[in-house]
Image (cartoon, coloured by chain):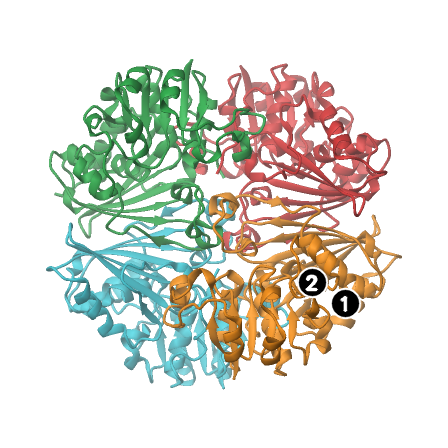
Chain colours: A orange, B cyan, C green, D red
Amino acid sequence: MIKAGIIGSTGYAGQELVRLLLGHKEAEIVWYGSKSYIDKKYYQVFGNMFDIVDAACLDDNMEELAARADVIFTATPQGLCASLVNEDILSKVKIVDLSADFRMKDIAVYEKWYGIEHKSPEYIKEAVYGLCEINRKDIKGKRLVANPGCYTTCSILSLYPLVKEGIIDPNSIIIDAKSGTSGAGRSAKIANLYCEVNENIKAYGVTTHRHTPEIEEQLGYACGQKIVLNFTPHLVPMNRGILVTAYGNLVKDYSYEEIKAVYDKYYKEEYFIRVLDKDVTPETRWVEGSNYVDVNFKIDERTKRIIIMGALDNLVKGAAGQAVQNMNLLFELPETMGLTQAPMFP
Amino acid sequence: MIKAGIIGSTGYAGQELVRLLLGHKEAEIVWYGSKSYIDKKYYQVFGNMFDIVDAACLDDNMEELAARADVIFTATPQGLCASLVNEDILSKVKIVDLSADFRMKDIAVYEKWYGIEHKSPEYIKEAVYGLCEINRKDIKGKRLVANPGCYTTCSILSLYPLVKEGIIDPNSIIIDAKSGTSGAGRSAKIANLYCEVNENIKAYGVTTHRHTPEIEEQLGYACGQKIVLNFTPHLVPMNRGILVTAYGNLVKDYSYEEIKAVYDKYYKEEYFIRVLDKDVTPETRWVEGSNYVDVNFKIDERTKRIIIMGALDNLVKGAAGQAVQNMNLLFELPETMGLTQAPMFP
Amino acid sequence: MIKAGIIGSTGYAGQELVRLLLGHKEAEIVWYGSKSYIDKKYYQVFGNMFDIVDAACLDDNMEELAARADVIFTATPQGLCASLVNEDILSKVKIVDLSADFRMKDIAVYEKWYGIEHKSPEYIKEAVYGLCEINRKDIKGKRLVANPGCYTTCSILSLYPLVKEGIIDPNSIIIDAKSGTSGAGRSAKIANLYCEVNENIKAYGVTTHRHTPEIEEQLGYACGQKIVLNFTPHLVPMNRGILVTAYGNLVKDYSYEEIKAVYDKYYKEEYFIRVLDKDVTPETRWVEGSNYVDVNFKIDERTKRIIIMGALDNLVKGAAGQAVQNMNLLFELPETMGLTQAPMFP
Amino acid sequence: MIKAGIIGSTGYAGQELVRLLLGHKEAEIVWYGSKSYIDKKYYQVFGNMFDIVDAACLDDNMEELAARADVIFTATPQGLCASLVNEDILSKVKIVDLSADFRMKDIAVYEKWYGIEHKSPEYIKEAVYGLCEINRKDIKGKRLVANPGCYTTCSILSLYPLVKEGIIDPNSIIIDAKSGTSGAGRSAKIANLYCEVNENIKAYGVTTHRHTPEIEEQLGYACGQKIVLNFTPHLVPMNRGILVTAYGNLVKDYSYEEIKAVYDKYYKEEYFIRVLDKDVTPETRWVEGSNYVDVNFKIDERTKRIIIMGALDNLVKGAAGQAVQNMNLLFELPETMGLTQAPMFP
């Protein structure tokens, strides 16, 4: 039985991790960390856990946590994990960091886009980027996993085969992304009140969103060159879900079948990636509550572009589900363990 | 392995049954029945099932279904199950009927409130009312289970201890209920379009809703007399969930502790009924996706009334989850099997 | 041209007042008060007002405001208006107070339910309860109007004819009310975040909501006796709207026509109260953005009760619209001026 | 007083037209046309109109309508207006067609994208494209106005100054648009049920949406060449609103101030177009219920692209409001008459 500790268990991603780990037969939660709710019963913060979780919330004490747990999930704002991690801790416990601290290899890029100093750059190289379908082999055996961002996971997995195979010009990529509101976190801000989000859609972080360089770096690895692209996120009045609509210039004419074959090459055997039937567009409702990513594409012969679409649940494959998938890889369990529930609709 | 067939698998309750049975380790679905989508792949009707269910939809053929399945779920409009059932079928297979056909013992009440003739009154007596927490013992060994309605389950379970123990005047009961829109079904009606339901709340079926006599009959059994009560349902702009707010006149003064003890007497050992902490009101979000019913009460010393509140997921405990719970009882499996997922939030 | 000042113009009710006054041809706004946004452009707080309102927000300075304005609207938390008002101010300006400070005549009831000391009890008697349809004559010529609460307006107007005419036992009244989320205000609280309110319904303030004594007092005047009743509010995932579903015991048998005649007696000439056709239930969507209250009733012959329903827009007839209606009365303008827009749907 | 007739008054756009015309002091509605609800009271179809509109719905009889009305609005599916219009009718009455029948000058493009034969091609040349801000002068004096589509209005007005001035490569344009659900119309389809749209976002009509050639044609006029572009619409769980996020390659380096000056050149004097302050992104909530279009842009120096955003209310500026604006132009009334309400929030 894997003993799991969660730092930041009272955010939306942290709570989703609790839900998933409760249903995982080889894991048990030993630490419900939450700076804001220390000593409060976890079920008093999340009423769904009444009669299920009796534990109270604990402070962020990574030393003690490392002594008690086999794996620590940090579902916290950027900067926290980097400020707590050290050699002693990493010698005792594996860490899956849901923040951005170890996602980018170029520390200058991290510090520029996040506007904070990195507190443990010595672990950046060691950390593995935990996009399981791409880096599966590199994750096994690691101590520190940088769990990818929600927009990032959806964007990269949607575009990866085309970029890897050189089918689109990587510098032509435009990603227009839409997210449910749980992605904005559970802190008390007027901008996230019900009446402000409901009956509205808006773009935000235009040209400046922090997931941009993360996507650029990973897709850059895929095509073997540095790239720049546009990424525009939008806030949608729904709880969960990310939809990515991406555009790229085809380097030459391709048929539907040719492109489909490329997606199948990379994803046919992937349990969590579903390449949909021709002309079926991904929709966030069909992946809600699950670890699936639904992808599809449409060629526009008039403009010589391809439109690529991807949908996932930002709290599952975009956060907690992928974290559990990484845990499974780290502990050599079947990769899908605890993650095979069908999506819940409606 | 229990072989399960579903008639009406392409309604919201039918699809939820599919979701739950897919996660049930002792059951497999052998028949995806749907008059409207015969020969269509099930995943083309519900995209969440892509790569999960490969079967196509089949017509309503109860004879053949009885030959192939161990249990049939009828998630269909009232009248259908009663028109199909017969001795031959019941000799081969168990039936859990999610419609109203066998819920009421008084055929005249059924025919009056539903406005249709009952096609197989000979099975009314045999059928057991499948409210598991109340009728658990009677369900085991039966052939035909009348799965309770969604409003009914929530109303009865919320009020049962008070009525059974004579704490409130049963003829003073007023039930004001609120339901998510999946309760209205998946048929194409203007009244259920997004723009008609969104940003709106309304009462409907005022004094005439068909769940009224079902609640009256069952609570009448609890107190040993015929009763009449008011039941007013409302349509709420959300997908899932039922909230019941009920009012009753206390027959004498009671303390919080006295009433709490009564609820504990009946529900302390019940896995799926959670009597909340003092002053915590049930909310539909805390039960979503799960088979729980959350209940609580508040005494009003000024008016000598008690306000009782209950919340459940109309598609789970209010339909498919309770149906699986009944299946577990019928086949002598652990009652909670396949139903222990934590509620999903947000 | 009436010069209007608004204290608390950056709450939801305050902003609605701005919207309505901008469309009122005999009023102009001279003071956009907001303690939280002093010196900030009003349109930076509410983007809908870009290019429409150029003014910046001002502090709460009632002395200066009284010098500049003909009428002051206080759309502020309880306690503020009572703490600012004095003889000098009232000699210069009329006040429409949207808070609860002057709604109740019994100061002890106010202090008990609101838990604060009343700072200017000397004006309680002078203040008029601004429920225009009931107290129209008393409002004209007054200096200080207590604008009724949103739940209160809907509850009282729905029940008034029945209570006034002695058709129901006033102590049997149970009011089950449902409100959109703008009623919860525009302050940053986790409980009001999008993901907390969306896909949920809950009761709150059960037996303790502060609108209870306000309803009891006013309906008590109608029937000439002190009464107690139950009032249970619920939070609904929508922006605007209040729906009241009320229950009362009929003192004898009545026909539909008899009750309809009673409603017509009081409301036939009322511009803003629409008694709907038989069997049509009020819905919040049909009054959105307007000053209408839609009411209707249904007799239950089985239980000898009557179910009364009312719907209004909490920000219009439940707050800002009624405040403008009161302003019109105070300044002897046509009562409907600036309030005749058709409801907006969807 | 202008006598207005509406064919298709029981769709969402038709009903919005009713709402706006009721508030227009120089217009009165003389014909509530609706094939589906002939003889039914209009308020029975739209409860908001109870006590406001007493008329019953009438059949589509354009001959008789032409005799009674000064202007006919056709808020109907494509093909209907073209099949009804003739010289006799146009000699008696002006027509504002909210369908696509007369929007495109190239009949082959119309027939290809809409898949129907055009029934009155002889009027295509005469018809003016009623995008008031661009074609104001041409509209005055015309008999037949093709009211632009909702997506189209938002897309064109957002991009027009940049295309007209040659600031972006017109063939690089990618438009990613998001619409509220009222844009899908008021017909009973499963895909538009509350539970199907709620908690979901999806793209649809990818590469094939009919507004594509309309945008291409109009922007082509602006830059004096034929262009192709990508247009991808998405369905968002909200009632009203369109948000356009468009991308274009800058032909050279520009500063914010230079681009801002271009927008100001075209829009500074436009009442209904609001160019927002620097870094403020358009949001649909800020234009709801109004005829405004909010636009803004952001230069991305990394990719040499510009991101242009526009927001409008699809039922107002995207349909009924623009139709009224066109009526005002046709009858030489002030262009903003009946359209100056502030947006309603929340």
Expressed as whole percent of the image width and height from the top left, the position of residue D174 reads 76, 45
Q: Within 10 angstroms of label 1, few (less than 14), some, or many (20 or more) residues?
A: many
List x then y, in percent, for residue C219: 19, 36
Instruction: Specify the amino acid type for callout 2.
Output: Val
Disc 1, SS: helix
Chain letter belonging to callout 1: A
Residue A295: give its label.
2
Q: Which mark is residue A263?
A: 1
How far, Cα to Cα, is label 2 from label 1? Answer: 9 Å
Residue at horizontal 60 percent and vertical 54 percent from the top: A179
Visible in this render: residue D222? yes
Q: Position of residue C100 (x, y in %)?
A: 28, 35
Q: SS of the residue at dot 2?
A: strand
Q: Is residue C196 above or below residue B117?
A: above
Query: Of residues B339 and A43, which is closer to you in this image?
Result: A43
- Above or below: residue A169 compared with residue A123: above
| Label 2 crowd bin: few (<14), some (14–19), many (20+), radius 10 Å | many
Residue B337 image offset from top left, x and y in percent: 43, 80
Give a yes or no on whether discs 2 and 1 share a subunit. yes
* Nearest to the observer: residue B99 or residue A340: A340
| Left-right relation of A277 to D189 | right
Q: Residue at x 66, y 54 (%)?
A: A114
Q: Are marks 2 and 1 in contact (CB under 8 Å)?
A: yes
Chain letter for the residue marked with disc 2 in the picture: A
Residue at figure coordinates x 73%, y 18% from the top left: D137
Relative height, residue B213 to residue D188 (above, below): below
Tell me which corner region of the image, top left, top right, bottom left or bottom right, holds residue C309. top left
Amino acid found under the numbered disc labelled 1: Tyr
Quarter of the image for residue B72 reads bottom left
* Left or right relative to A321: residue A105: right
Q: Earlier in the sequence, mark 2 or mark 1?
A: 1
Q: Residue furthest right?
A: A252
